[in-house]
């Protein structure tokens, strides 16, 4: 066995080292986030050790709110020698704007829920709930 093969990792080894499950590794491979690795004569995938770093990069980007499609773009920028920090900054700023919009929506949802929760009356008759009634009123006012 040559040195390259002895340093190659199985899908299970890669998954454990990156903190994901083997199905995730295969899924990312199908989605084009990981290059297809060489296979043994028995058909087993043999990943280079750098795959673990790439998987960790993907997971960290996901934790920051990037979609897999956005991560594909970041990975492409990572290997493109002509990429400037300006392009990465542009994408990061766009993600910040998306997150800010999502935060505003979540805050509006929270405020609406808090208002509805205040409408709850523990003494209400069974089958009558001010929260559910208010929710239904809101639903009726949003009918086009």
Image (cartoon, rainbow, N blue to C red):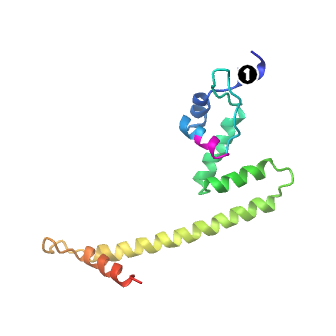
Q: Residues within 10 Å of mark 1 (few under 14, many from 20)?
A: few
Question: Is 133 positioned to the left or the right of 97 in the image?
Answer: left
In terms of image quadrants, where is residue 17?
A: top right
Q: Is residue 28 magenta?
A: yes
For image coordinates 69% across by 51% down, the residue present is: 72
In the image, farthest residue toward the right: 82
Count of marks, rendered view: 1
Magenta residues, dominant SS class = helix
Residue 57 coordinates in the image, percent (x, y): 66, 45
For image coordinates 64% across by 65% down, the residue present is: 96
Choose between 58 and 117: the one closer to the eye. Answer: 58
Mark 1 sits on what residue? 5
Q: Quadrant of the C terminus?
A: bottom left
* 136 in relation to 46, above or below: below
For image coordinates 72% across by 49% down, the residue present is: 75
Q: Quadrant of the N terminus?
A: top right
In terms of image quadrants, where is residue 69?
A: bottom right
* 71 in relation to 107, above or below: above
Residue 78 coordinates in the image, percent (x, y): 77, 49
In terms of image quadrants, where is residue 129?
A: bottom left
Q: Is residue 97 magenta?
A: no
Task: State the SS at label 1.
Answer: helix
For image coordinates 52% across by 73% down, the residue present is: 104
Choose between 65 and 120: the one closer to the eye. Answer: 65
* Stretch in magenta: 27-32
Residue 115 coordinates in the image, percent (x, y): 34, 77
In the image, farthest residue toward the left: 125
Residue 61 coordinates in the image, percent (x, y): 63, 51
């Amino acid at each position: 066995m040559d040195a390259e093969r002895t340093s190659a990792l199985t899908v299970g080894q890669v998954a454990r080292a990156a903190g994901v499950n083997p199905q995730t590794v295969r899924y990312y491979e199908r989605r084009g986030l990981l290059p297809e690795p060489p296979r043994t004569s028995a058909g087993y995938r043999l990943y280079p050790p750098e795959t673990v770093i790439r998987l960790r990069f993907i997971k960290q980007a996901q934790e920051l709110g990037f979609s897999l499609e956005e991560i594909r773009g970041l990975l492409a920028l990572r290997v493109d020698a002509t990429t400037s920090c300006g392009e990465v900054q542009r994408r990061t700023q766009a993600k910040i704007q998306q997150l800010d919009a999502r935060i505003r929506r979540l805050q509006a949802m929270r405020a609406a829920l808090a208002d509805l929760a205040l409408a709850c009356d523990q003494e209400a008759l069974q089958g009558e709930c001010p929260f559910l009634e208010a929710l239904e009123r809101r639903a009726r006012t949003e009918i086009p």
